[in-house]
Image (spheres, rainbow, N blue to C red):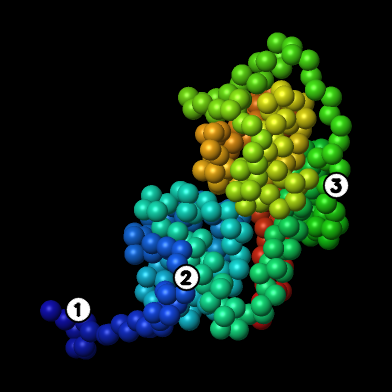
Amino acid sequence: MCLFQGEEMPSIYLKKSALPSYVARYSEPEHTPSCYTCGTCNSACPVNAATSRLRPMELVYKAKLGLLDELLSMPDIWYCIGCNRCVNFCPMMVNPLSLIQNLRAEAILRKLVHPELPEQHKEVLKRLLRALWHAAEALLKGETPEVAEYWDQWTRTIPSGKSNTLIRLPSDTPQTKAFRQMLQGYGVTATSLSSCFTCRECSNACPICLEPSVFDPLVIFRLASFGLKDVLVLSPSIWLCLDCRSCMSACSQGVKGALIIRQIQQIAYEEGFVAKDFPVRWEQLKSEVYAQYIHEIDNLLP
């Protein structure tokens, strides 16, 4: 039965540009056929949450249709910060991150972008993380900074010396014991904090551990093990965690690092170390910081 009165049903032509050579070159499975467009990856993506400029589901869907040329021309594939949240939260084990990484490699191979772009992208990502650290620091001090005004200053300034500062270990007081006990669980889930033996698997797996003075999960876990509550609850670093669970996946001792950080955040909030409106203001500030990051990536693209 014709759906259009008086005219033929239109035909839809899909591009067949996903050449076999593309599939053969990259061995990391993308599992794009398993996607049923639930949108979980879009919700999990921090870049999309902050800017609405990167929708992993759209990339996966276009890959299913074989729209390779269109995908290679999209700036979206360079907006990704490689956090792996889309992968870790996908119920069908689709791997948008591998798809993005493969598309980047293909774009370089076809000389659609400069070969220096990956290194330039990494530098911009470092700038993003520095800006986030300084933005969190300002917010913890009760300030409301203009991101555009402070962007150059923040991105050029590494929080140097933060990880080398001499910290006096607290005595084993009831308060210290209570803090460590609180970090042993998050809700009904045990975090296994005491099982950490500083192997650095978490730091190696963490996608944002590019400059340890900005963010290093192992430093946070060691400070937590020593019961250094006053240092942790006032640290800007704890608010940079993306909750991507990469540290949890990598840890051979089963330490649930992301949950430890979430528990520290909750303690900081509930005990008044941060303002009551801090979570809302932090989300707003992050959106401004990520918008600047997107702007810098756009300036790198042809």
Which amino acid type is marked by label 1?
Leu
For image coordinates 42% across by 74% down, the residue present is 23
Which amino acid type is marked by label 2?
Tyr
**181 lies above or below 98:** above
Q: Earlier in the sequence, mark 1 or mark 2?
A: 1
Q: Earlier in the sequence, mark 3 or mark 1?
A: 1
Q: How would you rate the neighbour count of disc 1 (Cα within 10 Å): few for under 14, some for 14-19, many for 20 or more?
A: few
Which amino acid type is marked by label 3?
Ser
- Depth check, mark 3 against mark 1: the one in front is 3
**20 lies above or below 155:** below
Q: Which residue is mark 1?
A: 3
Occupied quadrant, residue 14: bottom left
Q: Which residue is mark 3?
A: 160
- In this rendering, position of residue 280 left or right of residue 34: right
Toward the top, the furthest residue is 174
Q: Which residue is mark 2?
A: 26
Occupied quadrant, residue 21: bottom left
Q: Earlier in the sequence, mark 2 or mark 3?
A: 2
- In this rendering, position of residue 207 left or right of residue 254: right
Q: Quadrant location of the N terminus?
A: bottom left
For image coordinates 58% across by 28% down, the residue present is 195
